[in-house]
Structures are given as C-alpha cells and as structure tokens.
Amino acid sequence: MDKQTLINRTKNFAHSCVRLSMKFPSNKLGNHIQGQLIRSSTSVAANYRAVCLAQSGKSFIAKLSIVIKEVDESNFWFDFADNENLIDNKEDIIKLLKESSKLTAILVSTRKTMQLKLNNK
C-alpha cells in the first residue's frame, strides 16, 4: 500500500470515528468516551502524516509506533462504548473495529519490515 493511500485511509478512519462518536449520548460517560475516541482516532491520521516525514529509519519506527498505539487505543474505546451500549447500531462499531484491525496489521507489518532493514545495515 502506498503512502498516499494510507494517508487517506487513516484520515477516513478518523472521520468515521468522529461521526460515530457524535452518536454517543450527551451524558458524562458519552462525552468522556467521545472526547477520547476523537483524540485517539485523529491522532492516528495526524501521526501517520508525521511518519511520512520521518528523517531516519529510527524516527520512522518511533513515529509509526505512536500510530499503532493510537489505533489500539481507538479500538479500546470502540469496545468500551459497545460494552456500555452507547451505540444502538452495532454495525457502526463492527465496521470500525474491522478497519482498526486492518490498519494495525498493515502498520505492524510495516514496522517489522523497517526494523529488519535497519538491523541488516
């Protein structure tokens, strides 16, 4: 997958997460999880853009590790929102859980590849 495709995919992921979070109830828990999910998912997109500007292999790996952490955190908030029944349409969460899993697999694989390249230098 090329850089621009992944930039777009992470940005679309963030937009989808924001739209999902706007469906949460307007109460203390809903507002809290909404803020956490918006923060972590938009961080995925913003930090992936930073990955693309990394000036060294080590910087690339470090920045990519942040993106992986933020995708995982978003995944946690989907699961938590689902456990708390904050969304009526479970299909919305299921789609985002699938996308976060795919993104995680792509990003972890990319990190492993870069680590192998650095270790073989």
Image: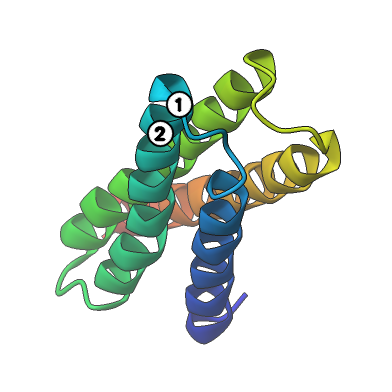
- Secondary structure under tag 2 reads helix
Compared to residue 8, the image places residue 100 above or below, namely above
User: Do the residues under discs 1 and 2 have CB atoms within 8 angstroms?
Assistant: yes
State the scheme by which the image is colored: rainbow
Tell me the residue at 52%/26% (across/down).
76
Q: Amino acid at mark 2?
A: Asn
Tell me the residue at 68%/23% (across/down).
82
Distance between the alpha carbons at the discs numbered 1 and 2: 6 Å
Visible residue check, residue 86: yes
Q: Is residue 64 left or right of residue 97?
A: left
Query: Dot 2 corresponds to which residue?
Result: 31
Badge 2 density bin: few <14, some 14–19, many ≥20, Cα 10 Å: some
Percent x, y for residue 10?
A: 51, 65
Compared to residue 93, the image places residue 2 above or below, namely below
- Badge nearest the viewer, 1 or 2: 1
Query: Dot 1 corresponds to which residue?
Result: 27
- Secondary structure under tag 1 reads loop
Total tally of numbered discs in the picture? 2
Observer-nearest of 116 and 41: 41
Percent x, y for residue 68?
A: 42, 44
In the rendered image, the quadrant that contains the N terminus is bottom right
Percent x, y for residue 83?
A: 66, 14
